[in-house]
Amino acid sequence: MRTTLTPEFYQLFAVLLVAAMAVTFVVAAVADGAFVWLRRRLSTRRQPRRAAVPNVPDKGRTAPTADRTPVGR
């Protein structure tokens, strides 16, 4: 049962291969754009308010230094 591949097969294979590559490229570009848009949108929403952040210098005054105990890792 040996069959030979015809030139029509190779032509159709090339067309389908190029079409599949184009679809993959478009889907990847759209997914990447959506991911970047979503990250930018979420990062602007989750920025903490300045008043809610502890130990932030207020108009040139610095917060007192905190005594911290080193933690072994």
Image (tube, rainbow, N blue to C red):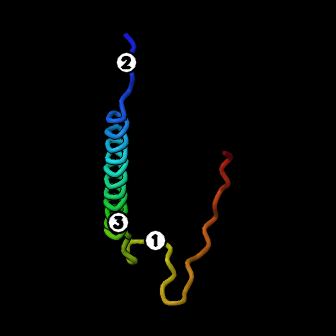
Above or below, comparing residue 41 to residue 4 in the picture: below
Tell whether 69 sits left or right of 28: right
Q: Quadrant of the N terminus?
A: top left
Residue visible at 31% across and 52% down in the picture:
27
Task: Identify the mark nearer the N-term, 2 or 3.
Answer: 2
Q: Which residue in the rendered view is the most extreme toward the top?
A: 1
- Count residues near mark 3 (Cα–Cα under 10 Å), then give few for <14, some for 14-19, many for 20+: few
Residue 73 drawn at (x, y percent) = 66, 45
Q: CA distance from mark 2 to mark 1?
A: 76 Å
Q: Nearer the viewer, residue 53 or 11?
A: 11
Q: Secondary structure at mark 3?
A: loop
Residue visible at 46% across and 71% down in the picture:
54
Q: Secondary structure at mark 1?
A: loop
Q: Which residue is mark 2?
A: 3
**Residue 54: which disc?**
1
Mark nearer the viewer, 2 or 1? 2
Mark 1: which amino acid? Pro
